[in-house]
Amino acid sequence: MNEQYPSRLLEKAVNEFARLPGIGPRTALRLTLYLLRQDAENVHRFCDSLRQLKDEVKYCRVCHNLSDTDVCAICSDPGRDRSTLCVVENIRNVMAIEDTQQYHGLYHVLGGVISPMDGVGPNDLELASLVDRVAAGGVSEIILALNPTMEGDTTNFYIARRLADYDVRLTVLARGVNIGDELEYTDEITLGRSIINRVSLDHYKSKL
């Protein structure tokens, strides 16, 4: 046992917290000691919520968003515009766009972007299922709401090639979102305007 810890159990808990992204040893110790001071009922409820999250949360079989059921609340909402799909990199981007209250269509979560440097290729993403959704009919517009980075643009152009044979309009967010910015850190007003003022992918490509 490390001599700085008076308890092996304390050290074990600190080490587990420290494995979380952005959590260093000092923050991990502070969180552990905080939980130790709480009522047992509160700590057990906290632990049970994490266990239930891991064991029971699902990915929507339609859009791949997180869900408590096989089909998420957005996909099953009859009030959403089913002719528009907003393609995003991850679940955090869905949450960011929903916070703007400016978009009322459906989503498709890729689970990443094409990045050869990181060993991520098209087959590692939910691209085939996106093509299947378009091929099934009923979709008239695809909003490519990926981060404005080289990897995001590479993924945009790959999607455009895969969907070239389908009668679907491809648009990208207006560049109120700056190059290199991540959507989840963009304020709601800027992101909302970028959705409303989206432009065609061909127009964007002509500016590169």
Image (tube, grey):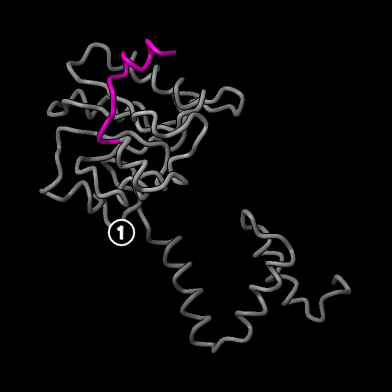
Image position, residue 179 (x, y; %): 49, 29
The N terminus, quarter of image: bottom right
Q: Residue at x 64, y 55 (%)?
A: 22
Q: Amino acid at mark 1?
A: Asp
Residue 202 counted in the magenta span: yes
The C terminus, quarter of image: top left
Please tell me which residue lies in front, 106 or 46.
106
Residue 162 counted in the magenta span: no
| Secondary structure predominantly adopted by residues drawn in magenta | helix
Q: Residue at x 44, y 45 (%)?
A: 184
Which residue has dot 1 on it? 68
Please tell me which residue lies in front, 177 or 184.
177
Image position, residue 97 (x, y; %): 33, 45
Q: Residue at x 40, y 32 (%)?
A: 146
Image position, residue 24 (x, y; %): 71, 60
Q: Horizontal placement of 47 versus 18: left or right?
A: left
Question: Which residue, as the protein is rendered here, is positioned at the far right?
Answer: 3
Mark 1 crowdedness (10 Å alpha carbons): few <14, some 14-19, many ≥20: few
Above or below — where is 45 with respect to 190?
below
Place residue 115 in its image quadrant: top right
| Magenta residues (range) | 195-208
**Residue 124 visible within the image:** no
Above or below — where is 122 with respect to 29?
above
Above or below — where is 108 with respect to 151?
below
Q: Horizontal placement of 190 versus 143: left or right?
A: right
Place residue 132 in its image quadrant: top left
Q: Horizontal placement of 191 versus 15: left or right?
A: left
